[in-house]
């Protein structure tokens, strides 16, 4: 199972760090390809976590993402 932390910059300028995992993907490289291809679609949606909370990312609201496989980008 691949897991990564994404720093997401939203269209409004806010930023949030979320965790995304996918048990079907073997490594982080494939996970990053999946995230970018999903968010590039008009109807792209990712289910992520921010602490204990479930956060739904819609591709239309995301301006940029940064990827850090071992934690948030500081």
Image: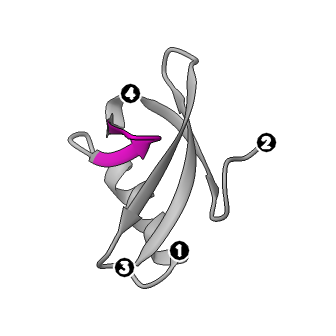
Q: SS at mark 3?
A: loop
Q: Quadrant of the N terminus?
A: bottom left
Residue under the image location 37 percent in, 58 percent down: 37
Disc ID at residue 43? none
Question: What residue would you read off at disc 2?
Answer: 74
Choose the circle earlier in sequence order: 2 or 3. 3
Question: What residue would you read off at disc 3?
Answer: 25
Residue extending farthest to the bottom is 26
Question: What residue would you read off at disc 4?
Answer: 61
Question: What residue would you read off at disc 1?
Answer: 28
Q: Nearer the viewer, mark 2 or mark 1?
A: 2
Choose the circle earlier in sequence order: 1 or 4. 1
Residue under the image location 56 percent in, 19 percent down: 14
Residue under the image location 34 percent in, 31 percent down: 60
Instruction: Name the spot of residue 3 as percent of width and height, x first.
Output: 48, 67
CA distance separating discs 3 and 1: 8 Å
Q: SS at mark 2?
A: loop
């Amino acid at each position: 199972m691949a897991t990564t932390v994404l720093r997401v910059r939203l269209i409004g300028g806010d930023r949030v760090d979320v965790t995304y995992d996918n048990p079907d993907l073997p490594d982080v490289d494939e996970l990053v390809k999946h995230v970018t291809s999903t968010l590039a679609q008009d109807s792209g949606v990712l289910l992520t976590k921010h602490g204990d909370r479930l956060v739904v990312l819609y591709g239309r609201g995301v301006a940029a993402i940064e990827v850090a496989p071992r934690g948030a980008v500081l």
